[in-house]
Image (cartoon, coloured by chain):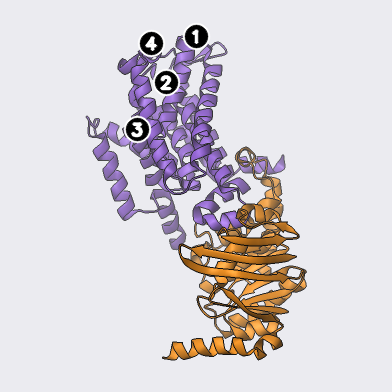
Amino acid sequence: MLEVKNLSKSFGGVHAMQDVSFSVRAGSVHSVIGPNGAGKTTLFNLISGVYEPTRGEILLDGENVAGMAPDRLARRGMSRTFQNLQVCMNMTACENVMLGAHLHTPSSLLGGMTGATRRADAALREEALRLIDYVGVGRHAHAHATQLSFGLLKRLEIARALASRPRLLLLDEPAAGLNDTETHEITELIRSIAASGVTVLLVEHDMKLVMNISDHLLVLDYGRKLAEGTAAEVRANPQVIAAYLGTEAEASA
Amino acid sequence: MKASSRALLRPSLLLLALVLALLPLAMPNNYVIDVAVRIALAAIAAIGLNLLMGFAGQISIGHAAFVAIGAYGSGIVTARFGWPALPAIGAAAVGAALVAWLIAKPILRLKGHSLTMATLGLGVIVNIVLINEVAWTGGPDGMPVPPLAVAGFAFAKVLHWYALAAVLLWLAVLLSLNLYESPAGRALRGLNGSEVAARVMGVDVARFKVRAFVVSAVFAAVSGSLTAHYLGFISPSLAAFTHSVELATMVVLGGMASTFGALLGAALLTALPQLLGGLHGYEMVFFGLVLMLTMMFLPKGLVPTLALRLRRKG
């Protein structure tokens, strides 16, 4: 469903991404891993239209969507979450999720002011509450976003992304900053989302989580593709081992 | 139908209707009623500006330009072309919407504070045009505007005006409250909260900003038109930078994104100078001071801060 060809991005003279190609099969959980600074988030920002690629193609169902604005990608069934949280802190949890359903409801200003969109809105609210429940934030549905903990906000972002009814969901480090129990719950949640037929592209540092749920892995290092394959294949790849041991050695030095 | 009638039954709207209806009984003389009319007319503009500033987070420091376009548009076509007031007010509102659209369309594709700068420029330009086009506007001396008459009924008494202004204010509050809880309102507040998130959720951010700008310009123009007919005389100071800052201060003081905040801000900033016996050229100092103190001590503004306090206690 998603095919990336020779994707490159440079910021000034820095090559954040060089010639990366891979493809994501519909219905799979596809993970992107790599040491810090490997270009994982850059890749996400390129695919989701936040950055414009310097070179290369991004094919979504065969259509080249490289450099397409995020709101137009949303119409084509792509949604995402953010590593550093992009929850609207000026709204309630429920309103955030309802914002996610923006494309599935009439949204004219005039309709809003006259109350004409009110009936459709009630249905939207039901759906949003169901999704909030589904990700496990049900108890806080009507709380203001500022009152939620980091872990709850991460789930809230997933609910908001799901409200847009995506076919391809990009999750940017959904387990970052979570404890073991929360990570376990997020793992189950991702599994359940994938089982519902949504294709998941995942960036994650937590190796246990990644190895557990991924059908396919892409390993990045210094903005290049280092390896790809199933969890077992990647784990046995000497280059991947070297890259990870290298980082650990540097980190402990 | 059911859903929209439920909207009218919202407690806050019922309460507002009650207060507006009973207020004249508590007002001792025409002077006080006159202040109430001015408050209501200013509040309509402030509620409109709040849709842009409070909801969408886009700052306009030239909004008085649209008040002036409404006032002069309506004034010129009634005084010089003999139009009846109602179509004149409508035409002025359409004119303001068109100007807003023409400015916002190219500007809002850009990022950052370009809209703020453009509105500042618009205010200056409108002010200068009003001063220089003497044949049309009367120049710096201003121009008289015929009194309001709708379908043969002349709004001659200040109490007539109070009734009209109160009804329109109530309508403005209704529209604003409706918008707040609608998909469009969430799109505006969402792009204010996180622009990138709103875009990823499918919100065409530039288009929504343009629409909010146009709608807020129409509120300002209607307020301006009515002010012109009410006062019977208008001058270019309507478009002055001071007036734009006054409108923005009303929104900030009352509380960003709060409809009743904009109303309260308009009430305070209109009534206080009257109580203080006029500001005599120190308007800018007064509004600047109010802005600074609000930012320092009530960054959320009056109404949201009070609402939070009450919720914590209760």
Are callouts 4 and 1 both on one chain?
yes
* Residue A144 % position (x, y): 52, 61
- Between A48 and B20, which is closer to the camera in this rendering? A48
Rendered view: B131 above or below B44: above
Residue B33 visible to the viewer? no
Q: Are marks 4 and 2 in contact (CB under 8 Å)?
A: no
The answer to which of marks 4 and 2 sits earlier in the sequence is 4
Q: CA distance from mark 4 to mark 3?
A: 24 Å
Q: CA distance from mark 4 to mark 1?
A: 13 Å
Q: Quadrant of residue A79?
A: bottom right
The answer to which of marks 4 and 3 sits earlier in the sequence is 4
| Residue annotated with mark 2 | B228
The answer to which of marks 4 and 1 sits earlier in the sequence is 1
The answer to which of marks 1 and 3 sits earlier in the sequence is 1
Q: Amino acid at mark 3?
A: His
Q: Residues within 10 Å of mark 1 (few under 14, many from 20)?
A: few
- Between B77 and A245, which is closer to the camera in this rendering? A245
Are callouts 4 and 3 both on one chain?
yes
Q: Amino acid at mark 4?
A: Ala
| Residue annotated with mark 4 | B135
Chain letter for orange? A
The answer to which of marks 1 and 2 sits earlier in the sequence is 1
Residue A67 visible to the viewer? yes
- Between A145 and A195, which is closer to the camera in this rendering? A195
The nearer-to-camera label among 4 and 3 is: 4
Specify the label residue B81 is tagged with: 1
Question: How many numbered marks does the figure carry?
Answer: 4
| Residue annotated with mark 3 | B243
Q: Residue at x 55, y 25 (%)?
A: B94
* Residue B167 % position (x, y): 52, 29
